[in-house]
Image (cartoon, rainbow, N blue to C red):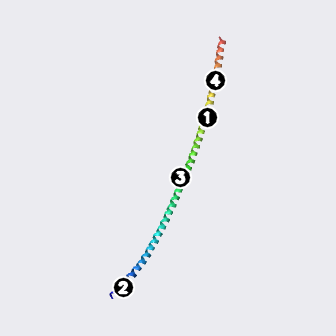
Amino acid sequence: MKKLILNIALVLALVVSVTSCRETKEGAENAADAIENAADEAGDAIEDAADATGDAIEDGIDAVKEGAEDAKDAAGEAVDSAGDAIKDGANSVKEGAEDLAKDAKDAVNKTTDDAKEKGAKALNNAADKLKDN
């Protein structure tokens, strides 16, 4: 009877260990599946992050290019405005110089005419005095 009890205990131990191995194997497979799913999700998240980073970099590059073009346009407009202002200033100086030269010429002519007239009067006065004497 002792052998019978030992044999029954041995069979029960084998049944329990076989059942345990199956459960452990299924648990390991489930864990492997969970790890694989987590790895896939992590890979997808990394790809999404890389895409978002690439998009952000491209947007940044585009913004810098647009800013540079705007600055270039603004600088060109400033140069054009400065050029126009210089031309306007030069024209004003030229007109002022022409006006000044004309005024000087007119003043010289008037002074000359006045001097001629006074000289003529002085000569006439001197001639009259000589005639009187």
Which of the pair 32/51 is nearer the observer?
A: 32
- The image position of residue 84, as x and y in percent, is 60, 41
CB contact under 8 Å: marks 4 and 2:
no
Q: From the image, tell me which residue sits under label 2.
A: 7
Category of crowding for the residue at label 4, using alpha-carbon neighbours closer than 10 angstroms: few (below 14), some (14–19), many (at least 20): few
The local crowd at label 1, few if under 14, some if 14 to 19, many if 20 or more residues have their Cα within 10 Å, is: few
**Which residue occupies the foreground of this view, 20 or 60?**
20
**Residue bearing the label numbered 1:** 94
State the residue position of label 4. Answer: 112
Residue 115 occupies quadrant: top right
Q: Quadrant of the C terminus?
A: top right
Residues under labels 3 and 2: Cα distance?
84 Å
For marks 4 and 1, give the CA distance. 26 Å
Q: Can you say whether 34 is above or below 18 in the image?
A: above
Name the residue: 65% across, 21% down: 116
In the rendered image, residue 12, in percent from the top left (x then y), is placed at 38, 83
**Which is more N-terminal, label 2 or label 3?**
2
Mark found first going from the N terminus, 4 or 1: 1
Using the image, determine if residue 4 lies above or below residue 115: below
Whether the residues at callouts 3 and 1 have beta carbons within 8 Å, the answer is: no
Do the CB atoms of the residues marked 3 and 2 lie less than 8 Å apart? no
Q: Residue furthest front?
A: 3
Label 1, label 2: how many angstroms apart (C-alpha)? 128 Å
Badge 3 or badge 1: first in the primary sequence? 3
| Cβ atoms at labels 1 and 2 below 8 Å apart | no
Q: Is residue 27 above or below residue 98?
A: below
Q: Residue sitting at 49 percent across and 65 percent down?
A: 43
Q: Residues within 10 Å of mark 2 (few under 14, many from 20)?
A: few
Asked if the residue under mark 4 is in contact with the one under mark 3, i.e. CB atoms within 8 Å, the reply is no
